[in-house]
Each structure stands twice: as structure tokens, then as C-alpha cells.
Amino acid sequence: MEQMQQAQQEAKEVSVTPTQTVTPEPTEDPSDPVVQKKNLIAAIEKAVEDNNVKTMTADLRYAAEDGQIGTYEKEDVAAVLLHLKKNQDDYQAFVEKLQDESVTVGEEDGVPYLLLTDSNLRKMTGTEEPVETVEAEIVTPTPTPEGNGKKVAIDAGHQAHGNSEQEPIGPGASQTKAKVASGTTGRTTGVTEYQLNLDVSLKLRDELEARGYEVYMIRETNDVDISNAERAQLAAESGADILVRIHANGSDNTSVAGALTMAPSTANPYLSQELIAECQKLSQCIITTFCASTGANNQGVYQTDEMSGLNWCSIPATIVEMGYMTNPDEDTRMQTAEYQQQMVTGIADGIDQYFAS
Ligand SMILES: [Zn+2]
């Protein structure tokens, strides 16, 4: 319904008659002082919102009577920031003042700042808060992590319902496999593998984002139908640097416990030797740190050329088999928040190490 209205709206907008002139989009040239001023005011507004005294101090200067450029005292900026947070009217008035043409853009070492005419920031904003109150109330902003420029695709293995339709196990392969197998189930807990995989994957996403990675999730709910080949292709299309596939293992022997990762062998007919080597390196990094973090039995890197989700990959990929859901102890442990965090830390450490080496 909404989409239809939007389409009609768009249709109206494009029916411009030839006599009408279309205003050109404003340029966003970062060296244009008008753009710089707009950006600086936005930065000040964000600094007030985030309690960021440092940014606000850096972005505001004043022109003294002798023509010198002065910086405001951090204590004053902190008091002003606190005052503006509490007094909406003064805040609005201040933002308006910044927009006044008497406020210009200056530059030091290529970094622009707003140049005000008033050396008394407290007075100009109506701030009366004493310094002591301010120190108690201004909380240091939690720094948003700088992006590290790397993107990780996470595939939480399986989905609510398996899909037994067949697909080739690799590009050009005559051998086929089910699009998505249904996965295993916790022998003791009764929890499904697709649920455990998703729970851990969501925590891994948060951990990686906190470490500065960009994350692409193949799925964030159980109610999807995406084949293993499609998952591999989606990961590559997302622009991710690597794909980490999260799974849990099962065995007829309930005493078997431990973790392993899977990588293609050098005999893999679908992947280049270069990509195979990267998959193996990624798998080795993750299994080592995973077992170091969790204390799980290290079953090493299992080489296989039968996995559609690896064979269809055009970026380095690994399958992490976190533990055996058929082993009562491991099944139970994998449902605890503490162990899940250890697993997540272990996988993230391995990813760090992969990119660092
Ligand atoms: Zn699985």
C-alpha cells in the first residue's frame, strides 16, 4: 500500500513541464566554506548530544580583540555543554547564533573550526553552572570504534526448515546436494542447531562490530530459505572480505566432543589454489583461537571438497563446527551465555589474527 502511494508520488514529481526550472542540487564540496560551516554545526550538535567536550572544544574558537584566535577553556565548554543539554531554548538560540553570518570558518593545519566573535562562551549561551557541578555530571562519551576497513560475512548455518531440493555442490559440478540440510539437534537440551547457530552468530556480529569490523549477516531470523550456494554468493556480493559459517556438529558416538573448522583441500576442482590457501589459513587461525578461548578439544582443520557453501565461494571462507550437540556435556555448555561468549571471543580472535598475519 505504501509503495503504491510512493510510486504515484514519484510519478507526479517527474511530470515537470518544460517551462519550469529545476533547482540544481547543492554541491557538497568539502572545501566549500558553506558546506564546512554546515558540517561543523552538525558536529557541534552531535557533540552536545554525546557529551563530547573534546570535539566541541576543538571545533569552536573565537577572534580576540587583538585579532588573535583564542580557544575556549575545556571547563567552560563542559559547563556550556551541560547547560545546553538542560535548556532547550538556550540550545536553540545557540545553534541559531552559530548560523549567523558573523560566525565564519577558520582553519588550522587543514582542519576547519567555527570562529565566533564572543570570547565568553558561558555568557553567550546563558550558562551559569559552576565547574564543580559540571565535572560530576558530564560523563565521558563511549568512543565509537573506528572502522578497521574489513568486512566479515557471517552465515548462521541452516534455517527453520531444510530444503531438500538439489543444487550442484560447486560451479559446473554434476554431483548435487540438498540446498539446505536440516542440521542436528541438542541431544540433551533439545535445542535445534539452526537456533544455536543463529544465537552465536548474532553475538559474533556484535563482537566483531565492537572490534571495528563491518558485518554482513546472511540471515538474522530462522524463517528464511537460502541455499548453501546462494549463501556463498550473497557473502561475496556483499563485498565481504571473508565468510565465516557457523555450525554445530553431531555424531552417532555421544562421547565425541570438540571443535573443528572446515576448509577445501588443494585438490578442490572449483577453487583457485590461492583461494584454497586463504580458506585454510582462515580455518587454522579460527580453530586455534577458538580452542584457546573455550578449552574445547581441538579436532583441527578438516579438509573437504564436498561442501557447497565453500565450493561456491569466491572469498576466503571457513565452516566452524563449534561443538557436538550429540555430546551431553558440550550440548549443555553451548547453551550457556558464558560459553557462548568464549566461543564468540575465540572466533573473533581468529579473524583478528587472520587479517593481522
Ligand atoms: Zn550444520
Image (cartoon, grey):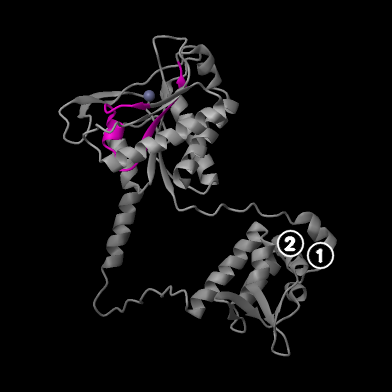
Determine whether the residue tagged by mark 1 lies in a helix, strand or loop. loop
Measured as percent of width and height from the top left, residue 10 is found at: 30, 61
Measured as percent of width and height from the top left, residue 134 is found at: 79, 60
The quadrant holding residue 220 is top left
Q: Is mark 1 within 8 Å of ligand 1?
A: no
Relative side of 85 to 109, left or right: right
| As drawn, 326 above or below 127 | above
Q: Could you tell me the amino acid type at mark 1? A: Glu
Disc 1 marks which residue? Answer: 129
Looking at the picture, tell me which residue is in the foreground, 3 or 251. 251
Residue at 74% from the left image edge and 57% from the top image edge: 138
Would you call the spot at circle 1 few (<14 residues within 10 Å), some (14-19), or many (20 or more)?
some
Relative side of 155 to 294, left or right: left
Answer whether residue 214 is visible to the viewer in this image.
no
The quadrant holding residue 23 is bottom left
Disc 2 marks which residue? Answer: 82
Instruction: Give the total number of marks visible in the rendering.
Output: 2
Please identify the quadrant where the C terminus is shown: top left
Q: Is residue 309 magenta?
A: yes
Q: CA distance from mark 2 to mark 1?
A: 8 Å
Residue at 62% from the left image edge and 74% from the top image edge: 96
Residue at 61% from the left image edge and 65% from the top image edge: 45
Span shown in magenta: 302-325
Q: Could you tell me the amino acid type at mark 2? A: Leu
